[in-house]
Image (tube, rainbow, N blue to C red):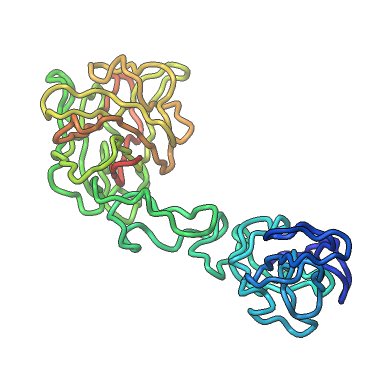
Amino acid sequence: MLGCPVDVPGPGPGVLSGSEGSTGASTGTTTGATDTGTSESTLDGSSSSGSDPAVCGNGVIEGTEQCDCGGAPCDLAGLHGKTCADVEHPAAPGPLTGGVLDCDPLQCTFVITQCSYCGDGMLGGVEDCEPPGVPLPESCAELGKGALGDAICNAECRFDTSGCTDCGARFDFDRCPEGWVALQLDPEAAPPSWACGLAGPGWGPGPYPSPVWGTGLDGPYADDESSGLRSPPIALRGCVHEALEIRVRHWLSFETAGPVVTDGGNLQVSDDPDTGFITIEPVSGTLYDAGPLQTSFSPPDGEIGWNGQNLDEDDWAESRFRIEGFARYDPLYLRFQFGSDGSGTDDGWFIDRVELFEVP
């Protein structure tokens, strides 16, 4: 709620609140006390004589008055049919959304001290949501606006579902979805350590309440590894935008030799499961680290990626990617690419969720 009344200078009760000698709204003008029959439109659409000034406190909204309750408790008529949510007021810290609108009996202007506003941290009035302290109560799916994407709270504390869509896919690895496969990317490298299941207690993120895809669920990944985790084909249909956002929720901990970058991984995309994968970089969230990976085999030796110097190591984090013109990937394949050298290992890389959807 607002903490102070609005102080707008104006006339006292029963005094003029319009302008004597003002220019009329129709033909002719009023000068001095001469009445030429001119009329002046009032807020409620009625007219008053050009020679009769508006009087605050007479219960009639006229001249420049916003309201006039005639000294009685205000009703809608005295407030010109307005509520808090109908009023834009320069003293309000945000859009007014509810509460009790009142009228200053001395100035016939709106009083908003009992109105709520968007941004006061309390959900009320015509608000759907209240940023930033009150979490968004519903998702795109719960609002019936699409299975993927983000419903947001706009500057008027109303739902904005323009980011919701059915174009995309979501993979929650708590059920080890079918179609994801572990690959050995170099025939001379160690077998892939990727597996889906529960991380063992005391290893990586374990104990964790649901399955994940990880490079070793009960122990470290292998030395000299060049491996990948590839998605099933993802068909994107019914899309209207040209950009795709990919979100990855993951936990990582890679071996590194002091300032020397060694083990790590990255994300790739392709429209062919056997050839043509290209590495993409995150645009927000947990980003790739500086310096190329130095692993025993290519890939990913020499490529950029997450490595053992990442500030978000040993914790769950999210990385977000963006692809422009994704229609050329039909279908789309994702591949998480991992590599290690031959002189030490660590807990590894664990992936909990992958989602991708069109964005404006």
The answer to whether any part of residue 173 appears in the image is no
Q: Position of residue 251 (x, y in %)?
A: 37, 40
Q: Position of residue 145 (x, y in %)?
A: 31, 58
In screen coordinates, is 345 left or right of 309? left
Whether residue 59 is situated above or below residue 207 in the rendered picture: below
Q: Quadrant of the C terminus?
A: top left
Q: Position of residue 247 (x, y in %)?
A: 34, 41
Q: Quadrant of the N terminus?
A: bottom right
Q: How many numbered discs, if any?
A: 0
Residue at 40%, 23% in the rendered image = 256
Q: Nearer the viewer, residue 314 or 69?
A: 69
Quadrant in the picture for residue 159 = bottom left
The answer to whether any part of residue 292 appears in the image is yes
In screen coordinates, is 269 left or right of 139? left
Q: Nearer the viewer, residue 285 or 237?
A: 237
Q: Nearer the viewer, residue 75 or 159?
A: 75
In screen coordinates, is 326 left or right of 122? left
Q: Nearer the viewer, residue 158 or 294?
A: 158
Residue at 21%, 37% in the rendered image = 194
In screen coordinates, is 91 left or right of 163? right
Q: Position of residue 318 (x, y in %)?
A: 40, 41
Residue at 77%, 85% in the rendered image = 72
Whether residue 106 is situated above or below residue 201 in the rendered picture: below
